[in-house]
Amino acid sequence: AQKITQTQPGMFVQEKEAVTLDCTYDTSDPSYGLFWYKQPSSGEMIFLIYQGSYDQQNATEGRYSLNFQKARKSANLVISASQLGDSAMYFCAMREETSGSRLTFGEGTQLTVNP
Amino acid sequence: DARVTQTPRHKVTEMGQEVTMRCQPILGHNTVFWYRQTMMQGLELLAYFRNRAPLDDSGMPKDRFSAEMPDATLATLKIQPSEPRDSAVYFCASGLVVLQRTFFYEQYFGPGTRLTVT
């Protein structure tokens, strides 16, 4: 079974608008962490934001916030006030307690910000 | 500005040749990862090391791939013999795992090595 599912292969958003990128996960571990990474066309992987399974509040980092709904097993990334430089591939990933340091990645969502 | 470095950035080789990719993790980081990215499979973990010891290499084809950390400043991934299906971008990442934050530690990725096997 897929551990991380990103159902949106591509998303489009107008500059300055907010956009939500979906991520659902599957785990039976009570302890886990959820990550979002950005991969621009240059290829590097850039860490954006982290949410722990026991964190009470949704994580925020600048214009990035994570809409964590534990019961639904979803960890959607919200980007506010989109910028042209936000155009990139976005990956959701999970680290489970029983998997040691292994990060499992979703297939990614290609975000395009239109001027 | 500490970064993970990888060499070479691009490699084109013929099937059957040996390929060695190198990674210099960020100084002080105790965990090093090797990932492979392809269009078909996405990002896959091949292997990772903690304090230079291999902890998990279950994602790596054992017959042709090998990963080592000869010292704390160098990680290598070797393919021998290479095959066209090995064509991919290979990423190295490093992180510092401390007891108090075993879940959250950021993995810093290198720029990747784009391997093409013809």
Image (cartoon, coloured by chain):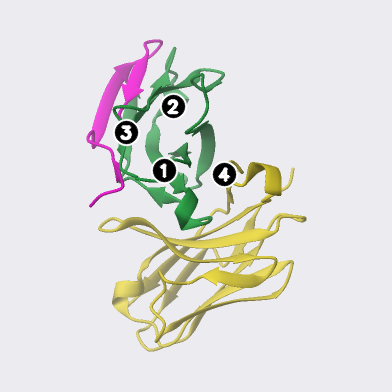
Chain colours: A green, B yellow
Q: CA distance from mark 3 to mark 1?
A: 9 Å
Which label belongs to residue A23?
3
Q: Write down the region rendered in magenta.
A: A1-23
Q: Residue at x 52, y 57 (%)?
A: A100
Residue at mark 1: A93
Left or right position of A54 against B96: left
Residue at mark 2: A86
Foreground label between 1 and 2 = 1
Foreground label between 4 and 1 = 4
Of B74 and B96, which appears nearest the observer? B96
Q: CA distance from mark 3 to mark 4?
A: 19 Å
In the depicted structure, whether residue A9 falls above or below residue B36: above
Q: Position of residue B89 (x, y in %)?
A: 42, 61
Q: Chain of mark 1?
A: A
Q: Chain of mark 4?
A: B
Q: Amino acid at mark 3?
A: Cys
Q: Chain of mark 2?
A: A
Of B94 and A104, which appears nearest the observer? A104
Quick one: label 2, few (<14), some, or many (20+) residues within 10 Å? some
Foreground label between 3 and 2 = 3
Mark closest to the chain's N terminus, 3 or 2: 3
Q: Amino acid at mark 2?
A: Asp
Which label belongs to residue B103?
4
- Respond whether the residues carrying marks 2 and 4 are from the same subunit: no
Q: Chain of mark 3?
A: A
